[in-house]
Image: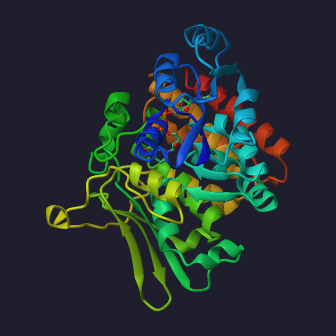
Amino acid sequence: MKGLCILGATGSIGVSTLDVISRHPDKYKVVALTANTNIEALYQQCLVYLPRYAVVVDKEKAVILAQKLANTAIQVLSGTAALEKVASLDEVDSVMAAIVGAAGLLPSLAAANTGKTILLANKEALVMSGDIFMQAVTDSGATLLPIDSEHNAIFQCMPSAYKTGEPSKQVRRILLTASGGPFRETPVEELENVTPEQAIAHPKWNMGRKISVDSATMMNKGLELIEACLLFNMPSDSIQVVIHKQSIIHSMVDYLDGSVLAQMGNPDMRTPIAHAMAYPERFDSGVTPLDIFEVAQMDFEKPNLQRFPCLRLAIEAVNIGGIMPTVLNAANEIAVDYFLNEKIKFTEIAIIIEQTMAKFSAGNADSLETILATDKQARTVAIKIINGLGR
Ligand code: NAD
Ligand code: MG
């Protein structure tokens, strides 16, 4: 039995993770579940999975949850430090990092520093901290398994040699697939007026609000390109983004001998979650088996960087390197939040990120302190730029 901590248990990935472990109660014991504010969902999960700890970041909500769980053995903790505490407990073997955004960095890093098996969904944590995160994993002997469906697919297709830290000499390039989101074919001039509801209505995946907007701008693919460079030690020009609207191939690895390995499956996050949880074995995920006759056809096209400027900005950020991916991520989090709150237009997301990046030069991202300070500064700059728009 392995002990599991789920950071972000009440979100889309957290709920899918609990669905997978319900099928394997002999393999995993839930030690800790965490949520930001949603105590109703966390309460129901606590009654079913009986974790030792339940963490609610919001202190007042934590008090309410503690009252509701008073006649159980579950300890309710609150605050951000509690997230780090539960991610590094001795009885925890694996940590599902499924908090959205930079808020997940410190708890994910705590798991990395304590040598856990990290099931990484929280791409923003890796993108913003880059080599610092990867170094923490190496130094502690932690195991990092990607949950993002594309990276999980690449992991399954990659030669095991990439784990040595050397870029693989056998691989020509990675083909990183993207659905293209809800606005793949929307006339560019109409993008200005799309609403948050339209942006979060993803054609293939049912996900949290922030990543759904990122998919609509294709910043999600930009963050994933940076994530792939870090996880697989590949230069950005060896990663080709491919729009594949059916979302059946989840990414491919193109080898020197002409072999292209692809991982396929129905678009359901329980597949990568179950892969990483059973690794190196396999177990059932509850996902409907793929019917290739029903798929019948698969299309591939190059992304249009004019339509998707956020993808261009992410490529620029990774090529500049240093703190620029941290700046990109922070500005994007602010811009998406303002868009979801109907304070800026969809097309202004990219403008705000580009203008924020222009205010920073490529400094070294050589310490956690630098990363946290840059993240904070970039948020302040992005908000200033938004305020300058006069809304
Ligand atoms: P979500 O919005 O559905 O859930 C987010 C979770 O994080 C919730 O449990 C919430 O309580 C918690 N949370 C939010 N803000 C927090 C804060 N400030 N402090 C602590 N906890 C906080 O998001 P999601 O779709 O499950 O995505 C989670 C992560 O996984 C994201 O980084 C996303 O990019 C990544 N991811 C998601 C999918 C997907 O299919 N949903 C696929 C690939 C990668
Ligand atoms: Mg993905």
* 348 sits to left or right of 79: left
Q: Position of residue 224 (x, y in %)?
A: 53, 55
Q: Quadrant of residue 117?
A: bottom right
> Would you place residue 385 above or below residue 150 in this image?
above
On the rendered structure, is 200 left or right of 58? left
Q: Where is residue 242 drawn, in percent x and y?
A: 39, 65
Q: Please report the residue visible at 61 percent of the width from the left and 22 percent of the height from the top.
A: 387
Can you give x and y, in whole percent of width and height, for residue 50 in the image? 54, 28
Q: Is residue 183 left or right of residue 136?
A: left
Q: Is 142 above or below relative to 48?
A: below
Image height of 102 relative to 141, above or below: above
Foreground pick, 285 / 112:
285
Residue 307 makes an appearance in the image: no
Residue at 58% over, 51% down: 119
- In the image, residue 111 lies at what x, y percent? 72, 46
Coloration of the structure image:
rainbow
Question: Does residue 385 lie above or below 307 as drawn?
Answer: above
